[in-house]
Image (tube, rainbow, N blue to C red):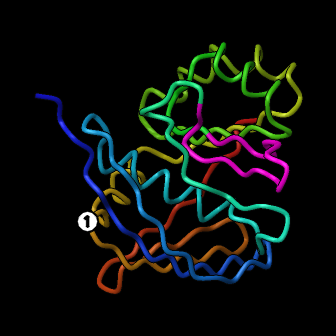
């Protein structure tokens, strides 16, 4: 019998001073049976850091990255269906990133484990040529802390100022400073 996804709901109250984005978002995430709380929370973080100020020209959506190999974790499409922003979480293969760079205007990767710096050192110079790929590292100790905020139903406040991100659930908070790799 195949394992089913765990449905998690999140309310994000975003105050992104760096980008001038202030909004509330309701998200429903299907957590793949093999996905950890840590990875799911990095997906939420990537959403909060990249959601546009408005959806007049299209919006950022949770895609089926773990279920469907032709889709990212998140993507922003314009009203014609063109992919404006393709967002990956973890340590995707070079081939996947290069393919995504040809399909989207912009590609972002959010890596988060102790192995991520080694993964990037072997990959960074090769994907740099694409020109539209950016990569971010969430320090492993911070991503593990972020996982403690995970739940089936979450109400989170996300505040970003001067590159620092604070995520809180009313009882606990986690400070994250994503490090730009590319």
Quick one: 140 or 60, which is closer to the camera? 60
Quarter of the image that includes the N terminus = top left
Quick one: 124 or 72, which is closer to the camera? 72
| Label 1 sits on residue | 152
Height in image: 73 above or below 168?
A: above
Quarter of the image that includes the C terminus = top right
Instruction: Provide the residue span drawn in magenta.
Output: 71-87
The residue that appears at 66% across and 17% down in the rendered structure is: 123
Q: Is residue 117 magenta?
A: no
The residue that appears at 52% across and 27% down in the rendered structure is: 91
The residue that appears at 47% across and 51% down in the rendered structure is: 42
Lateral position of residue 49 relative to residue 82, left or right: left
- Given the current orientation, which residue lies at the most extreme front position? 80
Height in image: 139 above or below 69?
A: below
How far across and down, in percent of the image, does residue 29 sit? 40, 56
Quarter of the view holding residue 131: top right
Lateral position of residue 50 relative to residue 67, left or right: right
How far across and down, in percent of the image, does residue 7 sit? 29, 57
Quick one: 125 or 16, which is closer to the camera? 16
Q: How many marks?
A: 1
Height in image: 155 above or below 108?
A: below
How far across and down, in percent of the image, does residue 35 sit? 32, 39
The secondary structure type at the circle numbered 1 is loop
Q: Is residue 86 magenta?
A: yes
Callout 1: 10 Å neighbours few (<14), some, many (20+)?
few
Quarter of the view holding residue 46: bottom right
């Amino acid at each position: 019998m195949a394992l089913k996804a765990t449905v998690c709901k999140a309310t994000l109250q975003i105050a992104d001073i760096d980008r001038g984005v202030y909004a509330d978002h309701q998200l429903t995430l299907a957590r793949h049976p093999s996905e950890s709380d840590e990875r799911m929370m990095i997906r939420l973080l990537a959403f909060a850091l990249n959601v546009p100020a408005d959806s007049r020209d299209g919006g950022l959506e949770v895609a089926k990255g773990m279920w469907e190999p032709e889709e990212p974790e998140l993507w922003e499409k314009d009203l014609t269906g063109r992919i404006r922003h393709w967002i990956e979480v973890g340590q995707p293969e070079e081939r996947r990133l290069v393919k995504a760079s040809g399909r989207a205007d912009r590609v972002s990767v959010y890596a988060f484990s102790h192995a991520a710096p080694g993964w990037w050192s072997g990959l960074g110079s090769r994907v740099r040529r694409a020109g539209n790929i950016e990569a971010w590292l969430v320090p492993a100790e911070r991503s593990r802390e972020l996982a403690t905020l995970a739940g089936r139903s979450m109400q989170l406040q996300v505040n970003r100022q001067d590159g620092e991100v604070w995520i809180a659930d009313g009882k606990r908070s986690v400070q994250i400073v994503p490090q730009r790799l590319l």
